[in-house]
Image (cartoon, rainbow, N blue to C red):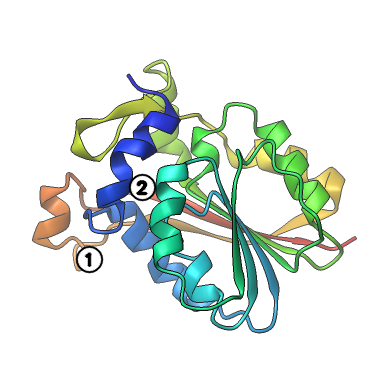
Amino acid sequence: MISVQDLYKKWASSYDTDINGVIYLEEEVTKKWFNFKNKTILDLGCGTGRYAIPLSNSNKVVGVDSSQSMLEIARKKIKNKNITFVNSDVTNYTPSQKFDVILSMLVYDHVKNLKKAIGVVKDASKRGTELFISNVHPYRAFLVSLNKNRARFPHGYESYQYYHPLDEYLHLLRPLGFELVDYKDLIFTKKMLTPKFKKAGEEENELVAVIYYFKKIN
């Protein structure tokens, strides 16, 4: 077992090129949902910038991540000045402004204290803020929780992963004025399950991940 910090330090160099079924399915949804223009966007847990960098072409983006190794790769890919990267844990970041859009994609699975992480969302949001969160599917995460929160990642790495069901998010976000607008379960259909994903261990009709879309209405 290694810490989350060590996991991403080791994984950073190959993160963008590894075959990752969860990310593939997630991006099939987000390429339809993430059509933002002239927005201020906070990407909590931005990693190598897979969302932050393309979104910065038509928006002002702040990307936050605790892994210096991941941010070093992200900074090498910057082609415009509409993006700022901050090296900070997503539970400790202090936003200097309110944002139109907040993303936290495949991040909160690594966060034990979700209440503290949502506190950052509270400080960064305003009426009308759109919040997008993706997680490993609760069913899969629940099975991990039965194994003392030990999860396996690419290259055989093992690190911690935490179970946060939708009810927990609703309990924390509704008092802040957020309501659930939509969600998508991510699942591999027979058509999507190409040989490369089979080789990576994905299975047909397996619940892989989920994306939640919240909006702050008051």
Query: Residue 30: x and y, percent?
Result: 48, 69
Query: Residue 114: x and y, percent?
Result: 65, 33
Q: In the image, is 203 to the left or to the right of 179?
A: left
Q: In the image, is 169 to the left or to the right of 11?
A: right
Of residues 1 and 67, the one drawn nearer to the viewer in this rendering: 67
**Label 1 crowding class (10 Å Cα cut-off): few <14, some 14-19, many 20+?**
few
Q: Is mark 2 on a helix, strand or loop?
A: strand
Q: Distance between the residues labelled 1 and 2?
A: 13 Å
Question: Is the residue 109 above or below the residue 103 in the image?
Answer: above
Q: Which amino acid, mark 2?
A: Leu
* Residue drawn where x is 41% and y is 15% of the image: 148
* Residue drawn where x is 48% and y is 65% of the image: 51
Of residues 104 and 42, the one drawn nearer to the viewer in this rendering: 42
Residue 46 in view in this figure: yes
Of residues 140 and 200, the one drawn nearer to the viewer in this rendering: 200
Query: Residue 159: x and y, percent?
Result: 37, 26
Query: Residue 146: x and y, percent?
Result: 41, 18
**Label 2 crowding class (10 Å Cα cut-off): few <14, some 14-19, many 20+?**
some
Residue carrying label 2: 207
Residue carrying label 1: 192
* Residue drawn where x is 36% and y is 48% of the image: 208
Image quadrant containing the C terminus: bottom right
Q: In the image, is 64 to the left or to the right of 196?
A: right
Q: Which amino acid, mark 1?
A: Met
Which of the 4 quarters of the picture holds residue 92?
Answer: top right
Of residues 118 and 65, the one drawn nearer to the viewer in this rendering: 65
Q: Which of marks 1 and 2 is nearer the N terminus?
A: 1
Question: Is the residue 196 above or below the residue 57 in the image?
Answer: above
